[in-house]
Amino acid sequence: MSDIKRVYLFEEGNAAMRDLLGGKGANLAEMTNIGLPVPAGFTITTVACNEYSAIGRLPDGLMDEVTEKLHVIESKMGKRLGDPDNPLLVSVRSGAKFSMPGMMDTVLNLGLNEKSLHSLIRQTNNERFAYDANRRFIMMFSNIVLGLERKMFDEIFDEHKAQLRVKQDTELPVSSLKQICSEFLALVLRETGHGFPGDPMEQLKLAIEAVFRSWNNPRAITYREKENIPHNLGTAVNVQSMVFGNMGEDSGTGVAFTRNMATGEKVMYGEYLMNAQGEDVVAGVRTPVPIARLKEQSPQIYKQFDTIATSLEKHYRDAMDIEFTIEKGRLFMLQCRVGKRTAAAAVKIAVDMVSEGLISKDEAIHRVRPKDLDQLLHPQFDPNAKLDIFAKGLAASPGAAVGKAAFDADTAKVRGETEPVILVRPETTPDDIHGMLAAKGVLTARGGMTSHAAVVARGFGIPCVAGCEVLDVNLESRTITVGDVVIRDGDWISIDGSTGNVIQGKAPLVEALITKEFETLLGWADQLRRIGVRANADNPKDAAKAFEFGAEGIGLCRTEHMFFEKDRLPIVRDMILAENEAERRSALNKLLSVQQSDFEGIFAVMQGRPVTIRLIDPPLHEFLPRFEELLQEVVELRLVSTMTQGNALKSILKEKEQLLAAVEGMREQNPMLGLRGCRLSIVFPEIVEMQVRAILQAACKLAKAGQEVHPEIMIPLVGHVNELKLLRDQLEKVAKQVLAESDVKCDYKFGTMIEIPRAALTSDQIAEYAEFFSFGTNDLTQTTFGFSRDDAEGKFLQKYVEMGILPANPFEVLDQVGVGKLMRICVDQARKVRPNIKLGICGEHGGEPSSVAFCHSIGLDYVSCSPFRVPIARLAAAQANVEVAGTKDV
Amino acid sequence: MSDIKRVYLFEEGNAAMRDLLGGKGANLAEMTNIGLPVPAGFTITTVACNEYSAIGRLPDGLMDEVTEKLHVIESKMGKRLGDPDNPLLVSVRSGAKFSMPGMMDTVLNLGLNEKSLHSLIRQTNNERFAYDANRRFIMMFSNIVLGLERKMFDEIFDEHKAQLRVKQDTELPVSSLKQICSEFLALVLRETGHGFPGDPMEQLKLAIEAVFRSWNNPRAITYREKENIPHNLGTAVNVQSMVFGNMGEDSGTGVAFTRNMATGEKVMYGEYLMNAQGEDVVAGVRTPVPIARLKEQSPQIYKQFDTIATSLEKHYRDAMDIEFTIEKGRLFMLQCRVGKRTAAAAVKIAVDMVSEGLISKDEAIHRVRPKDLDQLLHPQFDPNAKLDIFAKGLAASPGAAVGKAAFDADTAKVRGETEPVILVRPETTPDDIHGMLAAKGVLTARGGMTSHAAVVARGFGIPCVAGCEVLDVNLESRTITVGDVVIRDGDWISIDGSTGNVIQGKAPLVEALITKEFETLLGWADQLRRIGVRANADNPKDAAKAFEFGAEGIGLCRTEHMFFEKDRLPIVRDMILAENEAERRSALNKLLSVQQSDFEGIFAVMQGRPVTIRLIDPPLHEFLPRFEELLQEVVELRLVSTMTQGNALKSILKEKEQLLAAVEGMREQNPMLGLRGCRLSIVFPEIVEMQVRAILQAACKLAKAGQEVHPEIMIPLVGHVNELKLLRDQLEKVAKQVLAESDVKCDYKFGTMIEIPRAALTSDQIAEYAEFFSFGTNDLTQTTFGFSRDDAEGKFLQKYVEMGILPANPFEVLDQVGVGKLMRICVDQARKVRPNIKLGICGEHGGEPSSVAFCHSIGLDYVSCSPFRVPIARLAAAQANVEVAGTKDV
């Protein structure tokens, strides 16, 4: 015998003991202690489960303790387990700290055997009920505890129904149920070689062992890995006296929520079924009725239930999910827990509860999971609709979209003016931008999370599913084929950029809706957070969206995205392919005016909030046609021209060959690690000189018109302090010159992106020349891990996450251990040299809640993310800054 | 007047005062103090120079101090500067701490003007000598101090020679020299607007200023940047009374080395010229004679000089470079410094001086620059030969090679059996290996320092010039064309893999020669170093070379290089393209036996020293044909097959299309950051399982035969501890199984390469599963800087070094500030967790002296480098461990 207490009566526990008693056990104890009608029972602890897992059998003395507590229950109920005259029946349920569908769930009616069955018939005077209870017990126990396949039992049952040509289980006569029970027992004997255990204490022991064993079944392990639940928590076992909802029309069972968990409305919500066990509700054999009907059917019980529900909400200070049973007119509470809810409901309930005085604002902001806000910001498919999903790609840009398939950008552009269109491409290029902008959504068969389609779509807030490799996109026949499914030009198609699902037909949409409560909650979040929130926006339209969502500035404006627009790309190409400086300067002059007007637009929209503008970053070949396509064209042209001898062809060939040579000259083995960022600017300073001029001319123009402007000029990809020093010197000259020309005062800053490990490691040197740092954690993650996102996501990253090598995709959730360590080193060193340096993050992690919390913890000044994630970041930032004691796990 | 002493008489200084007096001044002082005949003089300090640079004029009081010291000299010499009757003439020479050819050098005969000229004539009774001295002075002063172009003076001089039709300067009559002097003075007046300064003190002041000014002239700055000399050292100015070697046949001037600086032989070596000034020797107007002749010509002076030379060697404890002048039979020492020498001489002199008792072994190992040893280990072109260099590429694999050009691998292989061959290719592929092995050297037009040609050549110790982009290699005509030069198939060609030079014809070679002294010196280095030295070797041949050069083990054996060999590549391709596991296993079985025999060979050669074997690292597509070439073939085949309808063609097309699809499926955007290293092994574990089996089967076989074996199995590219943990678990199983099968004891270790920043940052976690770490500083440099070597070296790295953004190419010289910081973090964290972890480096930095010193300083256990750099590393390691006081700068 050990001196650890392993079994707790419900009256011995409380809601805070989730670790030891599991969620279900802790809440049963809590309800018991606040005086609610809970059938008597006890809980075997998770510690006992872990002992079982360690030694492979029940710990010594456990069953003695179980027997002892059982006696308490027996005396309370006036019945005894296995008593031939007055038998106690119990349920055995697993209950871990976190709800886990992968585990053994429930065995009902345990304690039945030949003798107690007949007592039950005698006591209830209901032979049908008793045999029905018995056949359910044998099947559940055999399946869950003895491990026999449920299918074999179902076959016997269905055969009887077929013989009698009945459809409903309830139509089977008692004689059949009797016969079925016998056949079940024979089946068990045949399959296991042993008879069905008749001794109720034996049944109980086996059931407890089965629950413990189920903690380590493969489904449970997989589930825990997926949900990041530690494997060492163990599960508790709840043993509770049975109450029956199927003892006649004065009995019943149901589930209710204290508020509407879809909308958050303060209305009790749920359903019940008279003369039924929970199993029947789940199996959908009969249709349950709304809880409101109980008021008419049984006003007293309804009133009792309503009082209990209200007191539970007050007690738990949250909206609850309650299971109950009515046995012959008596109400019993079987379970309660904090109710799962939609994001919309979570927001409304949190805000309502503050005005009801139930919770504080601090608590309210912890009641909503930041990442769930995404649902509220984009159109979604109706959660109740059945969707015809035929493919799944990468969830590249969130939101749902519905439209008619168009297979090229021009078609999408034309049709998009009159009807919704989804642009479908093998992959997109800068030439497709006009079509993307005209489409409701974009679907590509190739490319990763940083492919052109994905990046551009996220930038413009267009839903996008990218890299959907099962799609066979045929541009000639203008069809998508996946197995039997064929989508033709103009067919309806739906995509979900939040999940990656691709759906045939026109799926029903629910539009995004920013409610009053949502704004209230975010307002509180703003009061409660320390860290600032900015947005990444590349054009005035995005900036406006960011402003609307509450961004306090632009943390990243990628100037080159402006280069990709259709009217500008030819100028950019002229600049790149210029054969002398005069040609290059002429192209740059054209770009100067378009860039300046873009910046004017952004500054105007942001109304004086700071705007961080990153100078050109990608390698120049990204603006040129793809090498492989050009090569193919040239090879074909060469062959054809040798055969046909046409002169026109020859001159086209020559032109293409020259272009091919130029593109080949710029090709790189590893473009991510090549001539880009500040390296490009050091080799070709003209481009960034033009950009700085455009930024400051725009700023001065607005400043002259009386508007406040705060441009922050960001030099990307610095790895060595000398890169920054050199460029800053050059560009300060341009800036000063523009200011001198404009004769107006205008504040500006120079800083750099920290996206190269060496920059983080030598931040003390770099901080001397930078007024701000912004962590470019996309590239910093790539270089710190030494893998590129495009290559990793397709080839091994998913596998790494599935195998548990990585806890999450580090491009989505910041790797605090590795990349985070580098960030800490960087921050600490930089602040020593320049205490007031402004520090931010503009990688995609800036909108991911756990990463926002990390940025808060290392003392960054702000996070910056895509406009649609600004609300998420605001909430996450507040949660990071406000600790709430006893925040409940949902 | 300041209280800083700015002017030192020679008798006031000594050799240790190089910082203050410059190298020349310090040595003049030293010689003066040990009683050698040095013409009286003084030195103005480098501090004064820095004052000048700061304020832009001579510091107040400096000229007073100069005047004061000048008086001391005047009274010593019994002459006065500017004295019309008995004038003192002086030389003014710059002299920085380090010799700097970019600066102003010397003004001779300062003090001459109309009056002193006539005194000189009177005193010497040699009008010709005096006018000659005068015209030299005017020209030097005008050029160096007044900044006039020397060309203008030469034109006047040459015109006179042309008029008189004389060839030698000495043939000009006095009258011409007089006339020339007048014309020179007129030229100065015309060009500067002022007359030539006649006041000797004015001349002196201007000359001193000119020396100070020259410290910051562009040539000097460039030179300092190139040689990494700090800009704040400043230069000293030496003012010394003139002695004349051109006063007749009893006068002369010369330079001598106390030992032979080419071979190190202990024989005085040098040359002199009677009746001449130093300038004449330099100008090559007359041919000097060997110093040995002085013994006959002037036995007494020779004896005096020989005694001085010997005492200087003893005094300086090093072989010296001495300048002297004989004035009318009197010997004067004008300069002495430690003599520059070849690597061979440095080694011999150091070893000889130890046996002569002049220096200690500690000092001896500091007397040779490790990187110079390279000269001794590879064949070199005869340094005296005139080479017809027509192109320059990357110095990709050191050593010189001469052979007949062959334009494909098969030809090279066949011809290479009977005659020396240079393999010339646009670039090489794995298909070319047999040709490379048969060639004396490899020359490619494309590809960087990590191109296939470069890596393989270095691996096998074959000289290679890669990426020589000016070459137009035409495989059809089998020619190389560069401008007018055409090299045809079979023509002689020479390449220098240490410099990148490509030479037309058969350049004369000097074979490498490992002398007794060389071995002695390295033996001392081994006694004196703490850090171990291993070699990178991929096959038994390389391992044997490494063993011969004293490697204490193999630090990196790259298993995939074995895959590239011609007989193996098809098997590797079968393995990669296998459509099912059975096919893959069958290919792997074939590889198992070849790998095993490679390992057996290496273990046997290494005689029980540890061998670190890296499991497969590169992405699989490196073993497949190039995508672009395949694409081209397929496009052509498609076009032709649609036109011809041939069935044979169709089936070839189909096969090629399948191969293309397979290759395309494996293409990566950034192969360096893709599916390689341990990532590959996690996705395809069969390959590494085979490799571990091969390693341990080989080890067990040798162990059974009684040989000691210590395999160290290295898992590459780990970024997260879980990668290592998972693979180690899997591979330990294989290892244990092989040991169980073999029934023999064999020691082995598992470890990892640290080449990803995240691995270094989380080394405490990783060290738990690794018995050793080896820094892969090639990849670590790439990821820490965020640039790939292939892309950077072609596009911007050279420019970065030229512009001073980076102090050196970080792939050659370890970046101690950034990459080094990561290494320190890694070492500190890892040793906390596993104090006895074995730490090494196997990047190319392992053979670079400053990087070896760094590795020593952070406490690594060994460095590993290519076999030919092992001696360099041994010496560098000893230097790092042994501090020698007063080690002289050469």
Image (tube, coloured by chain):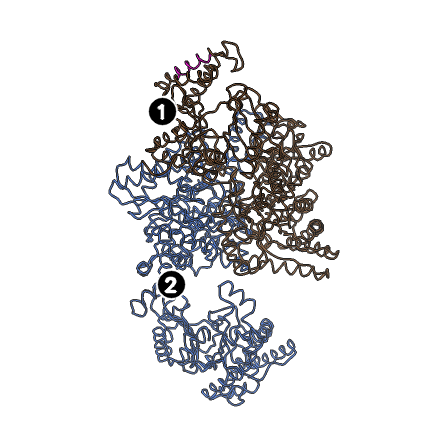
Chain colours: A brown, B blue
Question: Looking at the rendering, which quadrant does residue B222 occupy?
Answer: bottom right
Q: Which residues are magenta?
A: A176-187
Residue at 37% across, 16% down = A190
- The residue tagged 2 is B368
Label 1: state its secondary structure: helix
Q: Is residue B722 visible?
A: yes
Q: Which mark is residue B316?
A: none
Amino acid at pointer 2: Val
For this view, does B585 lie left or right of residue B118? Answer: left
Select label 2 or label 1 by which is in front. Answer: 1
Q: Determine the chain carrying the residue at label 2.
A: B
Q: Is residue B431 visible?
A: no
Q: Is residue A181 magenta?
A: yes
Viewer-nearest residue: B672 or B477: B672
For this view, does A22 lie left or right of residue B112? Answer: left
- The residue tagged 1 is A202
Instruction: Assess disc 2: are there few (<14), some (14-19) or many (≥20) residues with their C-alpha within 10 Å of its C-alpha.
Output: many
Residue at 36% across, 58% down = B877
Query: Magenta stretch mostly in which secondary structure?
Result: helix
Viewer-nearest residue: B194 or A29: A29
Seen from this angle, which residue lies furthest bottom?
Answer: B85
Label 2: state its secondary structure: loop
Instruction: Assess disc 1: are there few (<14), some (14-19) or many (≥20) residues with their C-alpha within 10 Å of its C-alpha.
Output: few
Question: Looking at the rendering, which quadrant does residue A10 occupy?
Answer: top left
